[in-house]
Amino acid sequence: MDIAEISKQLEHTGYIVLAKPLVDKLLADLFKRCHDDDPTRFHAAQVGRGVAKKQISSIRSDVIDWLNPTDSTDQAYLACMEELRLRLNASLYLGLFDYECHYAKLSYPRQSRGFISISPSKGQKRDAPKGAGSHA
């Protein structure tokens, strides 16, 4: 992780898009973990905090599963994020104390009519045909 470049971009633009934020093995392990485990571990995402927390599918229709600090893959990812937090705090004089991490799977409602798809031959945007079902 090039903290100097990340810090520079955050300082100048307020955001950064990283082409390769994690090593390939960790990315593959995270993908596998998200798709190989029991799918019943995922639950509907909610909005709000505490007693005001509710599931509102018009705002969030994804399903999530919080990272497990006892899982070795999740531990490796959390260690990378902790290193990033500490190094950004030092380089940008931030006060980041905590963060949240979870797996998320997006679901597209059946009534969803539009999406962006990249055509492999032309690379152009195209809309879903009328009455199209979900696109995953």
Image: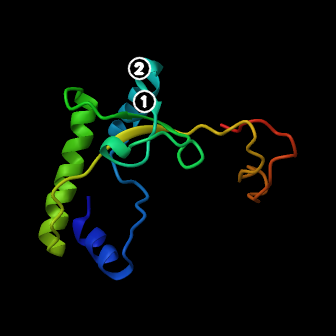
Does 43 appear above or below 21? above
Seen from the viewer's position, the closer of residues 98 and 17 is: 98
Q: Residue furthest bottom?
A: 12
Q: Report the front residue among 70 and 40.
A: 40
- Is 96 left or right of 103, judged from the image as shown? left
Q: Mark 1 falls on what kind of element? A: helix
Vertical relation: 96 (above or below) 31:
below
Q: Label 1, on which residue?
A: 34
Tag 2: amino acid: Asp
Q: Locate residue 84, reporting x and y percent.
A: 21, 57
Q: How many angstroms separate mark 1 from mark 2 (CA)? A: 6 Å
Image point 38% across, 70% down: which residue?
A: 15
Image quadrant containing the N terminus: bottom left
Q: Secondary structure at mark 2?
A: loop
Colour style of the rendered protein structure:
rainbow
Disc 2 crowd, CA 10 A, few/some/many (<14, 14-19, 20+): few
Name the quarter where the C terminus is drawn: top right
x and y percent of residue 44 in the render? 48, 33
Q: Is residue 37 above or below residue 132?
A: above
Q: Is 33 placed above or below 126 here?
A: above
Taking the image as shown, residue 20 lies to the left or right of residue 99, namely right
Three-letter residue code for mark 1? Cys
Residue 26, by quadrant, is top left
Residue indicated by mark 2: 37
